[in-house]
Amino acid sequence: MIQFYKYQAFGNDFILIDDQKLKLTKEDIKRLCDRKFGIGADGIVLLLPSLKADFKMQIFNSDGSEAEMCGNGLSCLIKFIKDLKLFTKTNFFIETLAGVMSVGCLGEKIFFLSKYPTILAQDVELNFLDKKVMFDFVDSGVPHSIIFTSDVDKIDIDIEGLKIQNHDYFKPKGVNVNFVSIEKDKIKVRTFERGVQKETLACGTGALAVSAILYEKYHLKNPIILSFPGGEIETIVDPNKKNIQYLGTSTLVFKGECSSSKN
């Protein structure tokens, strides 16, 4: 039996497992993340030992593919480590495939410090059958495209996001797709996540990517507050563009045991 913990950060939910001997297949991951036949989640996060940091994060998307990094998944792991009292200091380090992150807790707030996202391309135009789309392309640990639009609420994210992800420009790895609208009192973001293959309620690495583009194009002052359907993620951009800080919250939803196989 597998002992698991279900956490969420802004509605982006994950199955957390602390088991160094556990070997999950792609089918295991898909089954556990299934919302009808399994626990239900956007992904699975494994807590592992590290030779480079205090802990290591391994994360899998709900389709069974491994991700380089996930901001909200990392936020849930930080809270998981705190809740289980595995580390007593305020600050510690977690290894990811995107690098070692300085992380910690400030009261109820979870934070991590990531390197400043790499701007791969700006104002690139893609041609589709019936329209043209202008986008920016950013690597914030995982690849993100960013599309500014007048009203994100009018977009069918699952359909439009899948079209963009499957475009030849982003092959072979695909891309996360962020739609952004700047309104008077808030910046609204909706994200189609690669690996989940649909819209999620929030995206941590998407928040980092969007914040970098907003800082580059509009020179927004810190903190940058992004309104996702699941809640508001706050970021702080280093003026010298050396790093970017994520600030958010995550909570335990429930915990339990499940079988490691279908039978």
Image: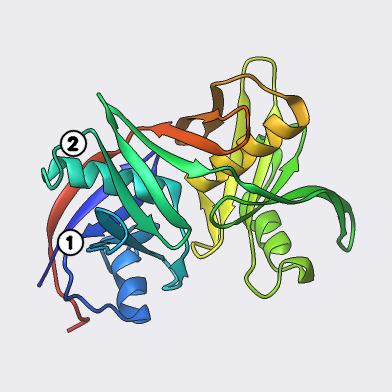
Which residue is drawn at the image coordinates 49% and 62% (left, top)?
196
The residue beneath circle 1 is 18
Identify the secondary structure beneath mark 2. loop
**Residue 89: image x %, image y %?**
18, 36
**What's the mark number on residue 89?**
2
* Image position of 233 (left or right of 52): right
Of the residues shown, which amino acid type is indicated by label 2? Answer: Lys
* Image position of 179 (left or right of 135): left
Q: Are marks 2 and 1 in contact (CB under 8 Å)?
A: no
Of the residues shown, which amino acid type is indicated by label 1? Answer: Asp
Q: Quadrant of residue 160?
A: bottom right
**Residue 178: image x %, image y %?**
64, 46
- How many residues crowd around disc 2 within 10 Å: few (fewer than 14), some, or many (20 or more)? few
Q: Quadrant of residue 63?
A: bottom left
**Residue 201 in view:** no
Which residue is drawn at the image coordinates 55% and 39% (left, top)?
207
Q: Quadrant of residue 224?
A: top right
Which residue is drawn at the image coordinates 39% and 32% (left, top)?
248
**Residue 54: image x %, image y %?**
24, 53
- The C terminus is located in which quarter? bottom left
Question: Along the line of sight, which residue is nearer the eye, 9 or 38?
Answer: 9
How is the model colour-coded? Answer: rainbow
**Residue 9 in view:** yes
Front position among marks 2 and 1: 2
Question: Along the line of sight, which residue is nearer the eye, 205 or 241?
Answer: 241
